[in-house]
Image: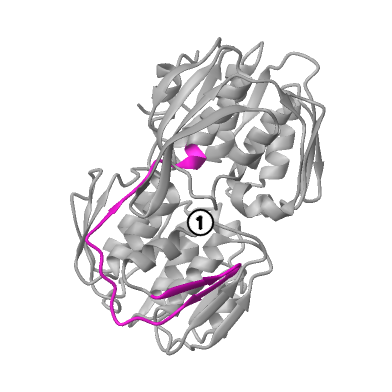
Amino acid sequence: MAAASSVFFQSSEGLRGSVRVPSDKSISHRAAMIAAISDSPVIIKNFLRAADTESTLIAVRSCGVRIENLSGNNPVVHGAGLRGLKSPATAIGIGNSGTSIRLLPGVFAGQQGSFTLDGDESIRLRPMDRIVAPLREMGVAIEAREGRYAPLTVTGGPVHGGFHYEMPVASAQVKSALLLAGLFADSPTEVLEPAICRDHTEIMLAAAGARIEKDGLLTRIHPVERLHLDEIDVVADFSSAAFWLVAGTIIPGSELTLAGVGVNPTRTGLLDILIEMGADISVGNERLQGGEPVADLVVRHARLHGLAVGGGISGRVIDELPLLALAGAFAKGDTLVTGAAELKVKESDRISGVVDNLAAIGVRIEALADGFIVNGITGPLGGKFQSHGDHRLAMLGAIAGLASRDGVKVENFNAVTVSYPSFMDDLKKLGGKV
């Protein structure tokens, strides 16, 4: 169902039912990229069909990679081999996909020819120096507008090995770009994280035959001659499931089952935080799917208490922190989030976006330099919510509306197509009122 540009979400009684949320966005991106440089056809089962991931699939196709079933849920990517991508005649448009523009330069580092990546107005405002600087240290020829903004141009060539990089900020995108470039180096590449961040790239590269070594927060990748995969089975996205975990927790009478959700511990910071706040969430039927841990999650309404969350966990919860602000609005006491300055450079400035929007509908919330503080709710909620074209803010506004007394009107709601095109259908299926 196409998402309308402006939607009014009404106060809803208990949400109930079972749903499988869309496939994981992060894993889908990586599947398309790694399949593109594999040495044989790769079936990507349950590929996420959404605007961001389509950008990556179309990007690799523009580099000469043949893709069967391009518009289906199980595309077959005919890998061109480790160094087989072809330089396209024009710039590669990646829309609003930050993952595409930050990871693909690592893939292009070892190819022949030049590759230019560009995106929409939002992408052109997001900082890219965090990958440009370390890639240059690895010997990669990469140029950026004003040294730090898109468009980016990568000219493939030799990649220096023996590189050790200590990331100043926990970022799976930066880590992944450097590990991908390390595939083409002449000796191992090391990346040290300041805190845990998602490791989907490492899991998938190891499955494809790359030698990956982990030592605490240090990841070492050895150069390879080839990558080989037969198939990748993408799990359901925890970041999408997170909206229903919070909705089920804060809306009285709710009981929701979320099937086959990826529970990679580098991603489930919000799950841990909600349980510590008093949420009633059970994890069952745990298993592996495509090398990734998955489980069925059952969430029921519960009373929460406030909590202080610092930067040590931010890499495991960064995309879900806006939802934590809403959960904090329904908790007893204060919920404090610090060490989350990374929120300022997402699809929008999510600190100001979350604070301004929640304040506008009646939440007592204050912005901090690197986070926010929320006071437990004292009155009814309702009003208008601006998504600023950010898919996560759009869905945050929707959940706030369902949990409100007076309803919430979300402007530019169609931003949800970036990661969760079926959000409205699932919301109605579970009993949400629009």
User: Which residue: 49% across, 66% down?
Assistant: 176
Q: Quadrant of residue 259?
A: top left
Quadrant of the image containing the N terminus: top left
From the viewer's perspective, is residue 139 above or below residue 63? Answer: below
Residue 406 is left or right of residue 54, and the answer is right
| Residue denoted by label 1 | 98
Residue 150 visible in the snapshot: no
User: Which residue: 62% across, 54% down?
Assistant: 315
Q: Amino acid at mark 1?
A: Gly
Query: Residue 117, percent across and down?
Result: 44, 66
Residue 230 in the magenta stretch? The answer is yes
Residue 273 is left or right of residue 334, and the answer is left
Query: Residue 390, percent across and down?
Result: 56, 41
Residue 404 in the magenta stretch? The answer is no
Q: Nearer the viewer, residue 33 or 317?
A: 317
Query: Residue 319, percent across and down?
Result: 59, 45
Residue 384 visible in the snapshot: yes
Q: Secondary structure at mark 1?
A: helix
From the viewer's perspective, is residue 288 above or below residue 261? Answer: below
Query: Residue 147, percent across and down?
Result: 61, 74
Range covered by the magenta-colored residues: 211-240
Residue 120 is left or right of residue 93, and the answer is right
From the viewer's perspective, is residue 34 above or below residue 420? Answer: below
